[in-house]
């Protein structure tokens, strides 16, 4: 297999195809482990999950058990979840608060900054036994606007450089509240029998929406009296953000907790939504505030972090379990000061649209699992992602997927990455584009 030719990228005739072995091959999966997941910055968690000294949360990232904590001094710490003694998992619960971390196997004890502070029968060790060398080990980590990332390669550049144009989109989330954003405790976790890259594609695929999620649109039309054609005809843009990151940014046609009122919120919510909007305008200026309130963003940070800033703000990460499987975890972000009915409304959107039993996610899982089943059929070697190559990229085109695949190809093959922005507009501008013919047709 020639891994340098799994992506066919020919801007001139407007051809962009991905060889389906990228989705089914165990050899490709192994290369991804070595060249993507062991080298890129990967999302670990959010600083708001450990607000107080002694708070901790555990995760598995790229098959590695890790945990992060707030030290007694208030610093953020990230640890490999393995005992320096003989290997046991030191942190064995998903989250909590601890004075210290004691390994359950032989009771070595570590303080919240990872230092070894207790060893039973320490006299049993010789004079060379150096507690200072036996603390918990930390991977390389950094955080940006509260989002914590880890990287298992010392050669990879710093996080801020890695995030490239995606940093601006994290700002658009983090700036929604002067007190910052917080992760609501608890998460959705589920498995999907499909290649993880199909989840990336699906997360920034705007034009499947009216077809795949028909039930949701019919429901909204029936309950809130919405005209479904508004969703089909929404305007927007797709962008490549550098380093494989991409986004689709569309005009919002459904309610947004920040701060786009909708009849489903009730008349009594109108004044408060206006107050939130006025506050955003005062803090960020009219242009940025309106962008925050009235546009939706589906962001992919290469390789496996998706932030859907739509009817709720969902942070979703997924890790391959093999060429045809992945484990997904999703959290809901809310303004730190949000409570009461506003928070309930947000969580309702998180569950009823984006949750694993909601309106959208089961449809999406069915779609990508059916793609994976289809790959087994054979007879077709390539999948097409060329939509929009010959025009200004619209939100419902596929530029944001191509930016992912270009980066993926360069990392897997070990070839230089060439940023191709195609005809993308400068970040910040959302051109008024006409609806695509397919969507217009679907409105009939
Ligand atoms: S493995 Fe942790 S104390 Fe022995
Ligand atoms: Fe979808």
Image (spheres, helix red, strand yellow):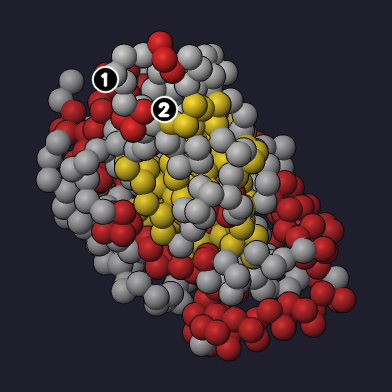
Q: Position of residue 316 (x, y in %)?
A: 53, 44
Which residue corresponds to the image point at 58% horizontal and 88% vertical from the top-left?
Answer: 282
Residue 120 versus residue 101: which sits nearer the camera? Answer: 120
Task: Give the side of residue 222 with respect to residue 428, left or right.
Answer: right
Tell me: is circle 1 under 8 Å from ligand 1.
no
Which residue corresponds to the image point at 36% horizontal and 46% vertical from the top-left?
Answer: 141
Residue for badge 2: 64
Q: In which quarter of the image is the C terminus?
A: bottom right
Q: Label 2: how many residues lie within 10 Å, few (<14), some (14-19) or many (20+)?
A: few
Q: Can the viewer see residue 31 in this picture? A: yes
Residue for badge 1: 128
Rendered image quadrant of residue 25? top left
Q: Position of residue 373 (x, y in %)?
A: 48, 21
Q: Quadrant of the N terminus?
A: top left
Q: Where is residue 419 in the image (x, y as percent from the top left)?
A: 20, 56
* Mark 1 vs mark 2, CA separation in Å: 30 Å
Task: Give the side of residue 17 with respect to residue 143, left or right.
Answer: left
Residue 363 versus residue 26: which sits nearer the camera? Answer: 26
Q: Can the viewer see residue 236 in this picture? A: no
Q: Can you tell which of label 1 and label 2 is closer to the viewer?
A: 1
Q: Is mark 1 on a helix, strand or loop?
A: loop
């Amino acid at each position: 297999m020639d891994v340098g030719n799994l992506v066919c990228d020919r801007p001139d005739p407007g051809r962009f195809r991905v060889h389906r072995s990228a989705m089914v091959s165990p050899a490709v999966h192994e290369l991804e482990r070595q060249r993507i997941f062991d080298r890129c910055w990967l999302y670990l968690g959010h600083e708001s999950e450990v607000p107080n000294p002694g708070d901790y949360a555990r995760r598995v990232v790229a098959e590695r058990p890790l945990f992060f904590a707030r030290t007694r001094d208030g610093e953020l710490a990230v640890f490999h979840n393995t005992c320096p003694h003989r290997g046991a998992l030191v942190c064995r619960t998903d989250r909590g608060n601890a004075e210290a971390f004691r390994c359950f196997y032989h009771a070595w004890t570590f303080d919240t900054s990872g230092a070894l502070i207790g060893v039973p029968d320490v006299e049993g060790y010789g004079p060379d036994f150096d507690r200072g060398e036996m603390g918990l080990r930390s991977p390389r980590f950094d955080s940006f606007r509260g989002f914590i990332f880890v990287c298992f390669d010392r050669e990879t550049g710093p996080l801020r450089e890695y995030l490239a144009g995606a940093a601006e989109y994290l700002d658009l989330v983090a700036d929604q509240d002067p007190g910052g954003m917080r992760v609501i405790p608890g998460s959705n976790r589920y498995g999907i029998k499909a290649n993880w890259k199909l989840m990336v594609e699906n997360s920034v695929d705007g034009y499947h929406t009216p077809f795949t999620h028909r039930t949701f649109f019919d429901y909204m039309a029936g309950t809130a009296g919405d005209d479904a054609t508004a969703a089909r005809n929404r305007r927007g843009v797709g962008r490549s953000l550098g380093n494989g990151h991409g986004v689709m940014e569309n005009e919002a046609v459904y309610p947004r907790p920040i701060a786009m009122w909708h009849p489903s919120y009730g008349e009594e919510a109108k004044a408060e939504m206006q107050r939130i909007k006025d506050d955003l305008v005062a803090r960020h200026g009219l242009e940025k505030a309106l962008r925050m309130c009235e546009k939706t963003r589906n962001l992919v940070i290469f390789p496996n972090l998706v932030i859907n800033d739509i009817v709720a703000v969902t942070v979703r990460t997924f890790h391959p379990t093999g060429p045809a499987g992945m484990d997904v975890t999703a959290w809901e972000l809310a303004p730190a000061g949000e409570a009461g009915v506003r928070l309930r409304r947000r969580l309702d959107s998180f569950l009823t649209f984006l949750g694993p039993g909601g309106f959208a996610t089961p449809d999406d899982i069915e779609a990508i699992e059916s793609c994976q089943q289809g790959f087994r059929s054979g007879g077709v070697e390539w999948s097409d992602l060329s939509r929009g190559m010959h025009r200004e990229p619209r939100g419902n085109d596929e530029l944001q997927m191509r930016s992912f695949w270009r980066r993926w190809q360069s990392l897997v093959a070990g070839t230089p990455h060439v940023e191709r922005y195609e005809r993308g507009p400068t970040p910040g501008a959302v051109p008024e584009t006409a609806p695509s013919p397919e969507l217009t047709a679907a409105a009939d």
